[in-house]
Image: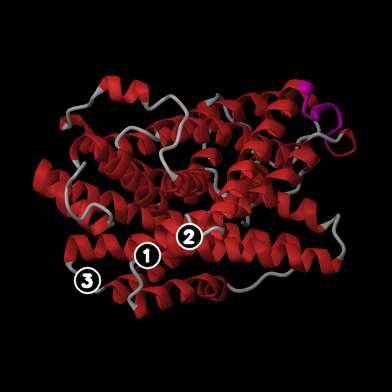
Amino acid sequence: MNGRARTTRRSGGLVGLLGPAFVAAIAYVDPGNVAANLSAGANYGYLLVWVLVLANAMAVVVQYLSAKLGLVTGQSLPEALGARLSRPARLLFWAQAELVAIATDLAEVVGGALALYILFDVPLLLGGVIVGIASLAILAMQRAGQLTFERVILALLAVITVGFVAGLVISPLDWGGIAAGMIPRFEGTATVLLAASMLGATVMPHAIYLHSSLARDRHGRQTDPARLAGLLRATRWDVGLALLLAGGVNIAMLLLAASSLPGVAGTDTIDGAAAAITAHLGPVIGALFGIGLLASGLASTSVGSYAGAEIMRGLLHVRIPLFTRRLVTLVPALVVLGVGFDPTRALVLSQVVLSFGIPFALIPLIGLTSRRSVMGRWANGPVLRTVAIAVAVAIVALNALLLVLTALGEA
């Protein structure tokens, strides 16, 4: 993103330093989250509330580490990896990261297309094309500077929040069920697959790569220790507030499905869930849900494309035109829509792919931010390092379990 010099301006207070984490947080409320959370709530009630709470807590740690890397080193995570890997290793690493970017865009474009179908009965393939074109317009706003881009994304985040939370206001909640849902447990292999999908939809690999770049481009690399300490404190607030909002929206979606949609036919698809929401909670709530889903698709596909460009630049040391970058990940999503594959199933499976991509971003991030040779005095302390390692182990363990279940044909 250009205009880095403008992003280093000093701000008069904490509020002026917030923003990068809210852009990254769009990844946590994308259409993949909608598919996974509605499926979890409609099919299993409050059983998997604990997955969202735990995943959001993990995300706070992960996104803070990513932002810290960018602020301290002046490098994004892809740039830091690109500077340390051999050319063959960089190419292989980029290949898996590109696969993750394709899975990300699949969820976001399909979700946006579903929203247009729900709201205006637009055919899915045409809806995907419209979402792709609209995301280009949003991405073009980067040329006006990061603050302009942030404000557009924040406006869409506000729409997403209203759209996905509105139905909860009139939904009868079972607080005992919610409390029971905070106890970690599964009920069969299908819930393990769904939990991995929810994790992949919450802790997003492209957000891990991107946040380091967002923080660096907003504030620049700081050499003044006092200034850097202040920015890191502000970043903790930025991450905490952004993910509190995103986590609340995710949990609200699951609670909405668990309280209003259990046993309702057709809720295994997003369009079916939207119809059920309209039927049970009224056309206004249904329309707000559709608008929130559309805003989610537009915002998340724009942020995802930006992340893909940063990954390519950092690992391959090349820049490509915005239109070309957009096509790289848009075409597979349009193919899925064109062949008639179940869009909600595609969304859920895309989140599983993302779950497998998390360790490739997370493990190097923990390693880099724990090295004094990289971070100096700002390297992770023993407590933060231990927590970060525990997060990585938990994610890898869940993915390994999912792989075993899939190989056995049970997932």
Mark with earlier residue (2, 1): 1
Quadrant hosting residue 29: top left
In the rendered image, residue 203, in percent from the top left (x then y), is placed at: 54, 43
Q: Are marks 2 and 1 in contact (CB under 8 Å)?
A: yes
Q: Which residue is mark 1?
A: 110
Q: Which residue is mark 2?
A: 350
Q: Where are the magenta residues, as a range?
A: 375-382
Number of residues whose C-alpha sits closer than 10 Å to that of mark 3, classed few (under 14), some (14–19) or many (20 or more) = some
Identity, as a three-letter code, of the amino acid under mark 3? Val
Q: Is residue 334 above or below residue 6?
A: below
Q: CA distance from mark 2 to mark 3?
A: 23 Å
Number of residues whose C-alpha sits closer than 10 Å to that of mark 1, classed few (under 14), some (14–19) or many (20 or more) = many
Q: CA distance from mark 3 to mark 1?
A: 12 Å
Under tag 1, what secondary structure? Answer: helix
Q: CA distance from mark 2 to mark 1?
A: 11 Å
In the rendered image, residue 26, in percent from the top left (x then y), is placed at: 46, 46
Under tag 3, what secondary structure? Answer: loop
Answer yes or no: is residue 392 visible.
yes
Identity, as a three-letter code, of the amino acid under mark 2? Ser
In the rendered image, residue 237, in percent from the top left (x then y), is placed at: 55, 26
Which residue appears at 29% of the width and 63% of the height?
114
Q: Is residue 44 magenta?
A: no
Query: Which is nearer the eye, 155 or 161?
Result: 161
